[in-house]
Image (cartoon, helix red, strand yellow):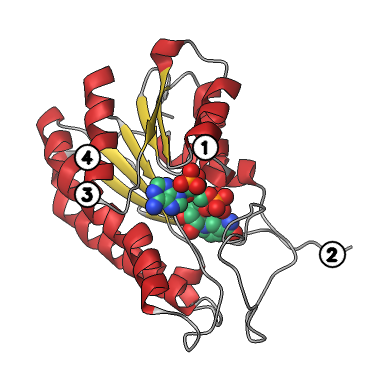
Amino acid sequence: MRCVKDKVVVITGASKGIGAAVARIFAAEQARLVLSGRNKARLEKVARSLDLPKNRVTTVVADVSKLVGMRKIISTAYRKYGVVDIFINNAGVGLRDTVINTTEEEYNLMMDTNVKAVFHCFKELLPRMMKQDFGQIINISSLAGRMGVPGLSVYSASKAALNAFSEAVAGEVRNENIKICVLSPGSTETDFGSGLRRRRSRAASGSTVKLTVEEVAEAVLFLARQNRNAFTSMADIRPLITKK
Ligand SMILES: NC(=O)c1ccc[n+]([C@@H]2O[C@H](COP(=O)([O-])OP(=O)(O)OC[C@H]3O[C@@H](n4cnc5c(N)ncnc54)[C@H](OP(=O)(O)O)[C@@H]3O)[C@@H](O)[C@H]2O)c1
């Protein structure tokens, strides 16, 4: 397995939830980190909690849905470390509601955060990774992108778009020694969507068994640690439902 010690790992949406757990697991592996999010106080709290020396972690406050935000993250990483080994597009937003009750503004928010941000990332980062002759991008999708969850229709559509987008671009750069991977977690214990959740659709399916953020972070680390020639392009992680 590949060792990620000293690798430069950029994590978006690192201020809480899955992204913060991914930051913790890569910090434990002694990677060098760039953590990004919009909430400065929360982001810095996560960075401090990692107990890393200042030259091994940096924070970038940025909105990934805007080109200027993605540029800021990538240019900070290159300015600080001169290289990006692994970029994890984890920032995401989900609004649980019926399509009838979803506004155009909410649609745009989910599409811009979950898909357009990754478009900006590909456009800005892939030329740099091609120049350095290696790199890996891990996009955090969702099982909702595989099966279209009622009550999460726009979110499902955004993650399905992310899956196809990632698969297509992976083929475009496969011969450039660049891996683009997608990890699709099932329902995970975070406060994901809580700020936006309004009316819970009666049709919405909700599993009571959830993954922990650490379990998802371990799956991200697995993708990052695959050997040079091994390339898991799409992976799902779901909770095992055990009999009592
Ligand atoms: N939790 C689940 O059940 C679940 C299941 C499958 C997939 N996922 C996916 O896993 C990823 C992380 O979800 P989570 O559960 O950890 O959610 P979370 O606890 O709500 O965290 C979301 C993170 O994304 C950041 N973020 C959101 N919009 C952003 C923007 N425009 N610019 C920059 N950062 C932004 C937030 O940072 P700030 O608030 O600081 O901006 C926060 O750090 C998402 O892509 C989600 O779709 C989650």
Give how far apart the Cα atoms at labels 4 and 2 are.
48 Å
Label 2, on which residue? 243
Give how far apart the Cα atoms at labels 1 and 3 are.
24 Å
CB-based contact (under 8 Å), mark 3 and mark 4: yes
Indicate left or right for 30 with 107 as reference: right
Give the structural element (helix, strand or loop) at label 2: loop
What is the x, y in percent for residue 160? 38, 70
The numbered mark, 2 or 1, whose residue comes first in the sequence reads 1
Q: Is residue 139 visible?
A: no
Please state, as top left, top right, bottom left or bottom right, where the C terminus lies in the image. Answer: bottom right
**Number of the front mark, 1 or 3:** 3
- Label 3 crowd bin: few (<14), some (14–19), many (20+), radius 10 Å: some
The numbered mark, 1 or 3, whose residue comes first in the sequence reads 1
Amino acid type, callout 2: Lys
The numbered mark, 4 or 2, whose residue comes first in the sequence reads 4
What is the x, y in percent for residue 221? 49, 37
Between residue 103 and residue 23, name the one nearer to us: 103
**Number of the front mark, 2 or 1:** 1
Q: Residue at x 27, y 59 (%)?
A: 116
The numbered mark, 1 or 4, whose residue comes first in the sequence reads 1
Give the structural element (helix, strand or loop) at label 4: helix
Q: Which mark is residue 67?
A: 3
- Label 4 crowd bin: few (<14), some (14–19), many (20+), radius 10 Å: some
Confirm or reject: label 2 Cβ below 8 Å from ligand 1.
no
Amino acid type, callout 4: Arg
Label 4, on which residue? 71
Give the structural element (helix, strand or loop) at label 1: helix
Give how far apart the Cα atoms at labels 1 and 4 are.
22 Å
